[in-house]
Amino acid sequence: MANYGPHSRRHGLNHWLADLLERHGMASLLRGVGAYGSAEMASRLVRLATTVVIARQLAPDIVGEAALALTMFEILRVLERTGTGQKVVAVEDDRLDAACNTASRVCWWWTWGLVALQLGVAGLLYGVFHRPVAGGILALLSAVYLFMAAGHVSYWLALREGLNGKLAKLAAAQAIADHILTALLLLAWPSPWSLAAPKLLTAPLWLVLVRRARPWTPCPAAGHIPTLEMLRYSGGILASEAMMALRTQGDNLIIAATLGTTALGTYYFAFNAGLGIVTSLVSAFGSVAFPMLCREESGHRRAGALRRVILLAVAGFLPLILLQSAAAPLYVPLVFGERWAFAAPLISTLCLAGVPLLISTIISDWLRAEGNVRRDAVAAMFGALAALTGLYVGAASGSLMAAASGLVMGQVLATCLYVSQILIPALRAPAPEVAE
């Protein structure tokens, strides 16, 4: 006899909802975001504890010294994102092995040059700018690139194949190990080195986990795709990533230059306590959305996928961003201590930068999926200039709050231009029909 009780109705509703999401192409996106989101929340709980230790163990001037070195590292590290990985995701199936061979070769050439560049910058910090601690930290972190190069192809193949659960777990494992090591080192040795050393110590863990998640070895029989083709595609992405890094890290350099390293310590803390979680989630969201857009045919089907990406972004991220901004005056003194309560308004303001960041990430994924990497680079450059100009104008007044407000306003103005010139025309394509 059929069971028409409440359990049966719930099962039928769940089945109908799952089928609806699958038919609309939302299921894979939700699974990917869910995997990254749950992993991110686990790592954020540990990071929260670490941030509390930093806030209670270190003064702003010590945090500022470490922030200077880590900022330079993040700016230089963007050069590791050559765009060869995105080519691995987007290339046709019959050329995949050849593209992987070429991507690996180009990545290793580039990595050794990047190591030399970072050592040179470290030498300048040490000898010219008289920052021996920052220079030493930067030199130490140059070894991270060697581990990243060894796992480069495996990581992007895993993204191409939708192995989001495995990638989310390895990202969480590395982040949690990083935060735990940071907290332990800070408790034993309150020093800028304690903030930086875990970045290198956890790099081998990432390499082992990514190679296990998606093993890869070169296939000499497949040959290579033309290196020039790889570089043409990757050049625009590299330029876009460089502009993104300039936008997200250049603010630290401007604050240090205009307001000093003590102010930088406060700003660095506020950024990580406020915008840090949103930045990580948006980055994870973009990593899931890009392969999804690439899998759809260009035209109305890809436009339909873009609509689904935007719908999930609006439903899942906007409430989180607004809630975190509004709640900052309540949780900052409670979690980080009264000594940081003065930074609550700054954290509230910086949280709002997550909105334009989310929109620009979606637009960037769309342009890359369309192969329009040059326009992506131009849009990223304009966004970086607008954000940093607003920050500099605010910082010139001598106020951290004015600097943060200028940063957000610059990002908002640039994002409004992105929406009108790129996003709205992309959404005007007819929606794909969904089979009943």
Image: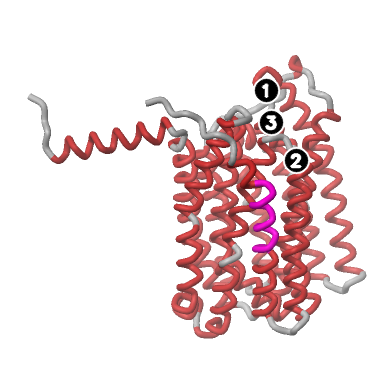
Q: Secondary structure of the magenta portion, mostly?
A: helix
Q: Look at the image and give the residue range highlighted in magenta.
A: 411-422
**Magenta run includes residue 214:** no
**What's the mark number on residue 373?**
2
Q: Label 2 near label 3: C-beta < 8 Å?
A: no
| Distance (Cα) linking label 3 and label 2 | 15 Å
Q: How far across and down, in percent of the image, does residue 428 sit?
A: 59, 40
**Viewer-nearest of labels 3 and 2?**
2
Work out whether mark 3 precedes mark 2 in sequence or the reverse, and give the earlier one: 3
Position of residue 128 in the picture relative to residue 155 (left or right)? right
Work out whether mark 2 precedes mark 1 in sequence or the reverse, and give the earlier one: 1
Would you name the residue on which mark 3 appears? 88
In this view, the residue farthest toward the top is 221
In what quadrant of the picture does the C terminus appear?
top left
Would you call the spot at circle 3 few (<14 residues within 10 Å), some (14-19), or many (20 or more)? many
Q: How far across and down, in percent of the image, does residue 369 sit?
A: 66, 36
Would you name the residue on which mark 1 appears? 92
Q: Which residue is located at x 78 percent, y 68 percent?
A: 134
Q: Which residue is located at x 76 percent, y 81 percent?
A: 259
Q: Which SS class for mark 1?
A: loop
Q: How many marks?
A: 3
Is 34 rendered above or below residue 281?
above
**Viewer-nearest of labels 2 and 1?**
2
Q: Which SS class for mark 3?
A: helix
